[in-house]
Amino acid sequence: MFLSKLKIQGFKSFPDKTELNFTDGVTSIVGPNGCGKTNIVDAIRWVLGEQKASTLRSTKMEEVIFNGTKKKKPLNFCEATLTIENNKELLPIEYETLEITRRYFRNGDSEYYINKNQCRLKDIHEMFVDTGMSSGAYSVIELKMIESILSQNPTDRRTMIDEASGINNYNKQRAASTRRLISTKSDMERIYDIMSEVETNVKKLKLQMKRYERHKVLTEDLLASEILLHKKSIDLLDEKLNPLIESRKSMINSKDVLLTDLSKKEKKLDEAQNKFEKTRLKMELFQKNIKEIEDNIIKINQDIIVATEQVGHSNNQIDQSNKEITTKTAQLSAIQIEIKSMEKKISQLIPKIDKKQFDYNKLDENFQKLCVESDLIEKKITSFQDQHSQIINKINLIKNNIDSNERLISHNKNLIKNHRNEVQEAQKLYNESKISLDKLKINLSSEKKDKDKNSNELVKNESSISKIEQNLISLENHKNKLSKDLLKYKNKLDFYNKLITSKDGASNGNEYIIKKQDNYRKFILGRLEDLISCPKNLVAPLSMAIGKFSDYLVINKLSEAKEIVDFYQSKKMSFNFIILDQIPKSKKKISTDTLLAKIEFSPKLADFLYNLIGDFRILKESDISTNKKNNFIFSDSSKILSNGILRVNPNKYESAMYTKHEILEIEQKINKISKVDLIKLDKEISKENDKKNRLISSSLKIKELIKINEISLGDIKIEIEKYKFLIKEHDNKQRAINVNLNILEKEIIGSAIKSKELNQQATNLNKELKDLDREKIKISRDSSKAKNKILESRQKLERSKINLIEIINNKNSINNRINDYKQNEKEISNEITRYKEDVDKSKTLIKNLVESNNLLKKELKEFYK
């Protein structure tokens, strides 16, 4: 992989498109200071994605765009394209030739391209991240960058080593993975918050659903009531409508009689209307004729007045035109006299002009001859001056060479002295570097031992952390399982509560009395289900046997029940009572194999329960064939026979007793999970996290120590390499200085010989210069005489020219005046002609107006007749 081509346009000092080709081998760019050599290096770094303006020797990124000169306008963008040959396929791309382009605009926008396809800056960074060619890598080294590398602190040096070894890519990936892990952990913590929020919303929505269902029932009742009301309203309206229909029929009959009378009267009205229309049309025609006559009279009077005014105006215009004709005729005769006078003056000036022109031409010819002679003299002077300047330049050049040789000799002597001092200094530094190198090797061995010790401790800690993390994962899984169970039990509890509240046949009066706690509460012994207790395994069979009676209220006397019903009768509530004094007494004994014998209850309930479930027996599947009694129930409640009715897999939740028992068990489980198990798990997780954090903290400290060890090792290795390099450099320096000493001594001898030769050349040139100065003085005298003659001739020529111009100007002035007078003469003649035409037109107009006026007066007399 190598750089083959660089194209630049608008980047710093390159306004035009510039293309640089890098062939095989080493390419050097040479030029004076400020010509743009470093700008080429900046362009390469900029294309590779450099974002720091300071690295590009600018204060802001906009300064990389060409900013204009006196001759060129500034550009609005800059662009650079780098061509790389991917012949060894080091870059992760299938092309052998890769073109990377970066374009930047003054508004701050940037565009990046790979093989002319637009891409992101990140794509370019990722492509070069492990190749050593990225913008931050050391493949592009600027001026003085080697000194900054040698003076770097350990952290910066570590970064450079990571970049060179390819570790930098993995460090970036590791940092990105760590950020993603932290983000995922925060997301997981947020999930539990969202779950709790959702559960709260679910409860609210369930409550809203109950209200909606209640609203729906009430709406349906309201709709039925409104339908009934509208039916009754329709019946009442029908009763009121019948007499109205009868009265409408009688009105229709009377309307027909009135319509016949109305039609007769309308016919008479139409006849009268037609007569009126005919009379009105005749009247309008008469009025129209009268109006036309009046309009014609007014128009004729107006025309007479206008014609009279025009006649008066035309007479005035004729008088005015006659006056103007008289005035213009007088002006015309005066102008003709003036023109004759001017033409006479011109004929007198022509001989004078010819004489002045002859004198001027003669003086001009003499002046031109003198100018030619002066030019020849000036050329000779210029030639002597050029020769003089050339000799002076040669003398100065020789003097400069002599001074340069003397400075070179002095400089070489100083260099010889300095080189001898440098040899001694290099020998001293060579010895010091060897001593420092031995000390660094001892320190390197010590740092390696410390690093190995810290690495072993880190491995132990990471193993312990791994075990704790596995334990934490299992604890978290167990916690999640408990949370799911808790959520499941809560949903189940809500379902059972809803089932109880929505159960068909439930008595709202029973619930009201239980909650009210008023004077009638003392009559209530309690619900039947609350007055019975049984083992857990018999709850389901007992609830199926009791059925709907489990929710009934138990009362001693019928009178007490009647008193309660009478009191709450206005509330229209339903009640379900078990009245003990109304139950027939049973003299039968309770058999030991019956369900009744296996439960506990108040003696007051014995007669009721015996009548209800006294003959129910608890059986297994295998006992059904031996049963000779009528009623039985399986221990798992899968079958129940009651008075000849067999129910298979009946719904256990039909009985509120079973549902309430299930609710109680679920509440116990919820309390156990939320108040015992989850708290215990949280403590264990917290304990494990504390252990993990302590170990992580310890590991981080050890890692810091290892990093310090690695940095120290790196520093020591660099220092060792540095001192090895310095030892070699000092040795090479001594040899190079000795070679330079021999060269300088030879140069001093050569410079002394050259100085003697130059002094001899300077002496010969000074002699030539003196001879040339004598000739120059002689020619200068001739030149001054010629210049004086030219000056006198020029003054005479100028005076003659001025006199000639004055006479010509006088002649031209008179000609101009004659032309002006002739133009005025022509204009006045035209005006006189125009005024005469206006007089003729006005007379014709007056004649026509008088005739028209007489005709109009005749018409007016006829109208009045």
Image (cartoon, grey):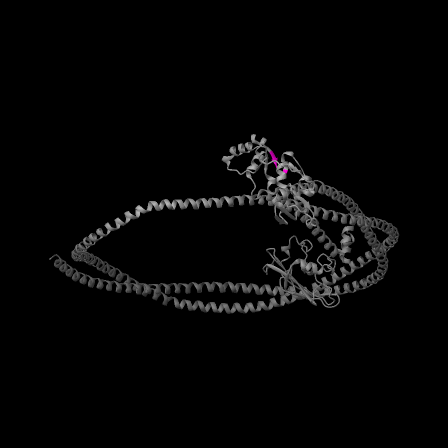
Where does the C terminus fall, quadrant-wise?
Answer: bottom left
Task: Residue 550: say if magenta.
Answer: no
The one nearer the camera, 356 or 382, is 382
Find residue 171 and report its horizontal and vertical position in percent: 74, 54
Find residue 683 and report its horizontal and vertical position in percent: 74, 41
The one nearer the camera, 451 or 179, is 179
Find residue 525 and report its horizontal and vertical position in percent: 61, 33
Image vertical order of residue 386 relative to residue 271, above or below:
below
In the picture, measured across the screen, residue 280 lies left or right of residue 584, that is left
User: Is residue 33 visible from the viewing direction of this image?
Assistant: no
The one nearer the camera, 236 or 671, is 236
Q: Magenta part of the protein: which range?
A: 525-529
Find residue 123 and report its horizontal and vertical position in percent: 67, 59
User: Is residue 138 visible from the viewing direction of this image?
Assistant: yes
Image vertical order of residue 141 relative to residue 587, above or below:
below
Where does the N terminus fall, quadrant-wise?
Answer: bottom right
- Pick out the residue farthest to the top: 519
Looking at the rendering, which quadrant does residue 104 occupy?
bottom right
In the picture, measured across the screen, residue 84 lies left or right of residue 263, that is right
What is the chief secondary structure element of the magenta stretch? Answer: strand
Image vertical order of residue 860 relative to residue 558, above or below:
below
In the picture, measured across the screen, residue 69 lies left or right of residue 365, that is right
In the picture, measured across the screen, residue 308 lies left or right of residue 574, that is left
Which residue is found at the position 50% from the left and 37% from the top?
572
Which residue is found at the position 56% from the left and 36% from the top?
512
Q: How many marks?
A: 0
The one nearer the camera, 110 or 513, is 513
